[in-house]
């Protein structure tokens, strides 16, 4: 049976959700902790409250960004590492205490379990920046609890998780945005508008390129640091002995080791791929579908802790005949190159180029396709929370962009050509590949 998906969901207001939700009665035991005096001329009715789940390397950056918006108020932070929770709490309290006019600010609550944070009915939205294997469960729980959601990319660890998350967000009418901030960069929007309005003629190929991560040798087990709930950090992933390079640095906010481990993520195919393949889909106008054929190959470490792909090459064929090649930067240069019958357009962060050069000053007319315009990713999210409109990077689009990456990862693992039905979201020629659309979760966690 084919799914019918509207591109503009009917988004419930928070008031409507609270009236209809079965969890309202239980949630009434939570007191509102933000006094009106904190807001001054902006009372709570004009601002919304935010809880931050995951305050590590990316999460702390998101938290700092949110602090810069007057229409949002962070009231709670959550992390399985108590040192990081303490640091985040201090940043939030220092920021709002300086704004408090009469010293009545009562502080930022802290949690080690995301379920306690999303249970609070005085929180309107959550920002989630956890390891990839911890994306789906908190986001689904937040949607069911009536929260609007910002979720760092990639959307999910598996295609099954992405489908369930997208369906849940839409079922509960939540505003959702994924951290695909390139959509809020004018260069990427201009490139995609030019392609979709035929400035390079008939689109023929798209070349996507980005770097890869190194491998490392075996790492000896280590004692779990005090203040880290390691069992909770592992969550739905398989049990494994602790070593610092598996999780995150204990003394700073450097790049964490879990990014290079297949139990927690797919490597740079979803790390950078979620950004660049998203732009490729935007420029092709395939945001709500996907390729029909995929083949890939990759080098993988033969031993050691870090086991995601190294050098790689993936070829996607779409129903309209367009071919997308996604490779490491040894083959395709960093960014996205759209090649057509009458020219090309190349875009990456900080650069937009074209042939002929005149394309760069070619205006998009009022009768031509004009893409969604956002000049600030978080501002777009907060505007949409207020208006209840769809964001520039909504959940179904995020799912489709993430799926492209995960399809490539499956093809690389299997090393053979796969045929994909983007409507049914199933492979049509390989049962083994279909089994890789989901992963088992360690008890007691489940979708």
Image (cartoon, rainbow, N blue to C red):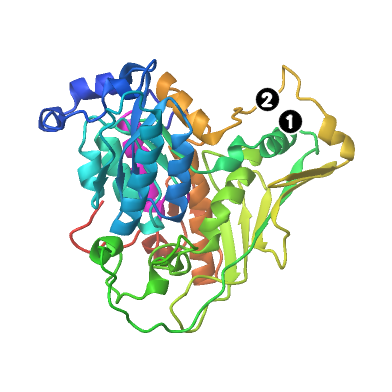
Asked if residue 362 can be seen in this view, the reply is yes
Asked if residue 8 can be seen in this view, the reply is no
Q: Which SS does the magenta portion mostly show?
A: helix
What kind of element bears circle 1? loop
Q: Is residue 372 left or right of residue 13?
A: right
Q: In this view, does 240 lie to the left or right of 72?
A: left
The residue lying at 50 percent from left, 83 percent from top is: 302
- The residue lying toward the viewer, choosing from 437 and 68, is 68
Is 155 in the magenta? yes
Q: Where is residue 366 in the image (x, y as percent from the top left)?
A: 72, 17
Q: In which quarter of the image is residue 100?
A: top left
Depicted 252 relative to depicted 116: above or below: below
The residue lying at 77 percent from left, 40 percent from top is: 202
What kind of element bears circle 2? loop
- Disc number for residue 197: 1
Q: Mark 2 points at which residue?
A: 369
The residue lying at 33 percent from left, 45 percent from top is: 89
* Label 1, residues with CA under 10 Å away: few <14, some 14-19, many ≥20: some
Q: Give the range drawn in magenta.
A: 153-173
Judged from this view, the residue extending furthest toward the front is 102
């Amino acid at each position: 049976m084919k799914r019918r998906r509207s591109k503009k969901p009917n988004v419930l207001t928070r008031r409507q959700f609270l009236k209809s939700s079965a969890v309202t009665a239980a949630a009434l035991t939570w007191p509102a902790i933000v006094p009106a005096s904190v807001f001054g001329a902006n009372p709570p009715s004009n601002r919304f409250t935010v809880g931050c789940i995951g305050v590590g390397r990316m999460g702390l950056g998101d938290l700092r960004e949110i602090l810069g918006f007057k229409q949002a108020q962070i009231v709670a932070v959550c992390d399985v590492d108590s040192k990081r929770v303490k640091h985040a709490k201090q940043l939030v309290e220092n920021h709002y205490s300086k704004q408090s006019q009469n010293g009545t600010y009562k502080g930022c609550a802290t949690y080690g379990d995301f379920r306690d944070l999303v249970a609070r009915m005085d929180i309107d939205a959550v920002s989630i920046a956890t390891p990839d294997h911890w994306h789906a469960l908190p986001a689904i729980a937040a949607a069911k609890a009536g929260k609007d959601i910002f979720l760092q990319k990639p959307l999910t660890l598996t295609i099954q998780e992405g489908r369930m998350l997208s369906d849940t967000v839409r079922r509960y009418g939540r505003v959702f945005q994924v951290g695909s901030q390139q959509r809020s960069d004018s260069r990427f929007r201009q490139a995609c508008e030019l392609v979709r309005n035929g400035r390079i003629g008939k689109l023929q190929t798209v070349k996507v390129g980005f770097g890869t991560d190194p491998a490392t040798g075996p790492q000896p087990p280590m004692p779990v640091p005090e203040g880290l709930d390691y069992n909770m950090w592992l969550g739905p992933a398989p049990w494994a002995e602790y070593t610092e390079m598996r999780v995150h640095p204990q003394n700073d906010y450097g790049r964490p080791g879990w990014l290079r481990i297949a139990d927690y993520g797919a490597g740079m195919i979803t790390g950078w791929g979620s950004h660049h393949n998203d732009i490729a889909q935007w420029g092709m106008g395939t945001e709500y579908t996907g390729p029909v054929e995929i083949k890939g190959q990759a080098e993988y470490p033969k031993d050691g802790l870090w086991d995601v792909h190294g050098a790689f090459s993936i070829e996607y064929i779409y129903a309209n005949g367009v071919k997308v090649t996604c490779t490491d930067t040894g083959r395709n240069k960093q960014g996205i190159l759209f090649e057509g019958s009458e020219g090309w357009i190349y875009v990456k962060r900080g650069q937009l180029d074209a042939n002929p050069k005149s394309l760069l000053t070619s205006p998009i007319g009022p009768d031509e396709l004009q893409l969604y315009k956002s000049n600030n990713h978080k501002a777009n999210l907060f505007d949409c929370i207020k208006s209840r409109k769809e964001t520039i990077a909504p959940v179904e689009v995020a799912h489709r962009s993430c799926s492209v990456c995960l399809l490539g990862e499956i093809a690389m693992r299997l090393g053979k050509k796969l045929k994909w039905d983007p409507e049914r979201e199933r492979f049509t020629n390989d049962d083994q590949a279909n089994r890789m659309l989901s992963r088992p979760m360690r008890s007691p966690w489940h979708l």
